[in-house]
Amino acid sequence: MKIMDWLKLIKDEHNSFHCETEELANEFLTIAHNLGYKWISGTSLLDVNHWDIWEENTCYCFSKEDGGFSYARMDIVRSWAFNVINVKELLYGRKPFKLKR
């Protein structure tokens, strides 16, 4: 996926990124880190992935207002009417991913 595509997806505050494995979480957070993003606290996305809290239900969301990433459980993200983007499909899927609200 092109850098501009990642930037467009991440900048849309209505998108969340579901990582069903810790490996996917680390891969996604590395991409976001390489694009200059950090946690809301200002720390590096590579310092900790927070995946162990919600495990296979972990979603990451960017907040323009707070200037960084946060994480939440998938059912909470859906209750906010966010698009849930499956990172596995995004990275490795053969078909184009679909936004799910």
Image (cartoon, helix red, strand yellow):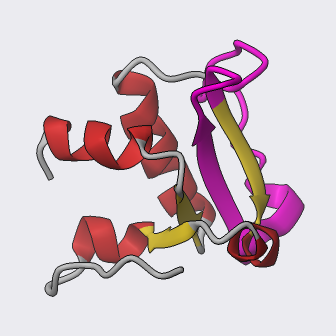
Magenta segment range?
39-68
Q: Residue furthest bottom?
A: 95
In the figure, is residue 2 to the left or right of 54?
left
Q: Residue at the spot x=83%, y=66% of the render?
A: 54
> Residue 48: within the magenta?
yes
Q: Residue at the spot x=78%, y=78% of the render?
A: 75
Quarter of the rendering occupied by the C terminus: bottom right
Quarter of the rendering containing residue 6: top left
Depicted 4 relative to depicted 59: above or below: above
In the figure, is residue 2 to the left or right of 53?
left
Quarter of the rendering containing residue 64: top right
Quarter of the rendering containing residue 77: bottom right
Q: Residue at the spot x=14%, y=85% of the render?
A: 94
Q: Residue furthest top?
A: 42
Depicted 45 relative to depicted 28: above or below: above
Rendering coords of residue 49 (x, y %)? 69, 42
Rendering coords of residue 7 (x, y %)? 29, 36
